Amino acid sequence: MGKRKWGDRRDAKLIRDIDAMHYIMPLMYPNRCDNEAFMTLHINLEKTEEYIRRKNKENPDNKIAIFEIIIAATLKAIKLRPHMNRFIANNTMYQRNELTAAFTVKKNFRDDGEETLARVVADDKDTLDTINKKVMDQIEFCKNYEDDSTKAMNFIKKLPGKHFIGWLARLLDKHGLMPKSVIATDPYQCTVVLTNLGSIGMNIGYHHLMNWGTNSIFIVVGKKKKRAHYDKDGNITMRREIALSLTIDERISDGFYYARSLRLLKRLIENPELLETPLDEEVSY
């Protein structure tokens, strides 16, 4: 990770060789929620679902689903496209030290069912199998135990002076000084937040970012469905697809970089055998 230098945060390094435009943008547009770029990906599931069927037949005790493939593909794409792991805090751009994905876990499917927070920390040598295990371990833990952030929030809830606590929390967050126990599983302190609306039968929608925390990417996964495609002669072919909507802080890079990153993400999800290689191993796209 290297020695921490003046200007670095404990969770990220100051980007010192930044170009003038990306140096100026946070000064002119300081709020993350004012700088959201919205993008959509349509994923062809033909090879992906065949891979899942084959993989689960070979490993019935360690089954995998489309959401785990999307998480693994997202982490690999971000690892290979490091600008996507940047964030802006206190009008300054940083490169995050860790690569992390967050998602919520509903303990039971009822209107009053409690939600808790899950967080996966990726290693350079992680593969689809190890990411899947980390996700399953987190889901199991969240359904049976209370995570550290929830414990901290329940404690803070009992304290007086909520307005002062809120002001102090925002100040500490701005400078990256929030206690680790409070933000241990806070999704908005992670590289990417994902939510699987398809699991409850919903289509995609665009989720906003937060000015709180450091999260620069939010991905919503929709439900699987057939979509019409037209060839050059106007003939229609129906393809089984899944749609992803992405909300990205447009200040962390440029449109060309985002387009290539999304192209890589699409290739990884549609060709999940590429996820059997370590996250840091390059792929063509």
Image (cartoon, grey):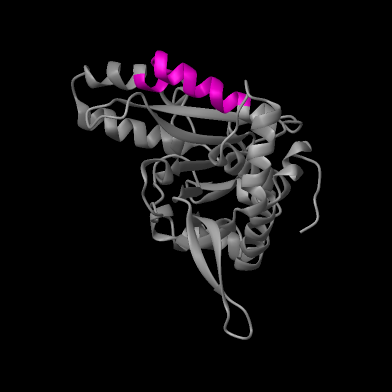
- Magenta stretch: residue 257 in it? no
Q: Residue furthest top?
A: 145
Residue 241 point in image, percent of width and height:
54, 57
Residue for point 40% across, 22% down: 149
Query: In the shown orientation, is residue 166 left or right of residue 186?
Result: left
Classify residue 163 by image quadrant: top left
Residue 15 visible here: no
- Magenta stretch: residue 136 in it? yes
Residue 141 point in image, percent of width and height:
47, 17
Residue 285 visible here: yes
Residue 144 point in image, percent of width and height:
41, 14
Task: Name the residue nearer the viewer: 64 or 226.
Answer: 226
Reply above or below: 264 against 116.
below
Reply above or below: 76 against 42.
above
Residue 101 point in image, percent of width and height:
55, 36
Numbered disc total: 0
Task: Name the residue nearer the viewer: 271 or 285.
Answer: 271
Q: Write down the region rendered in magenta.
A: 133-150
Query: In the shown orientation, is residue 153 left or right of residue 283?
Result: left
Q: Residue furthest left?
A: 160
Which quadrant is home to the C terminus? Answer: bottom right
Residue for point 67% across, 51% down: 47
Residue for point 38% across, 15% down: 146
- The kind of secondary structure the magenta stretch mainly shows is helix
Task: Name the residue nearer the viewer: 143 or 156.
Answer: 143
Task: Name the residue nearer the viewer: 186 or 169.
Answer: 186
Which quadrant is home to the N terminus? Answer: top right
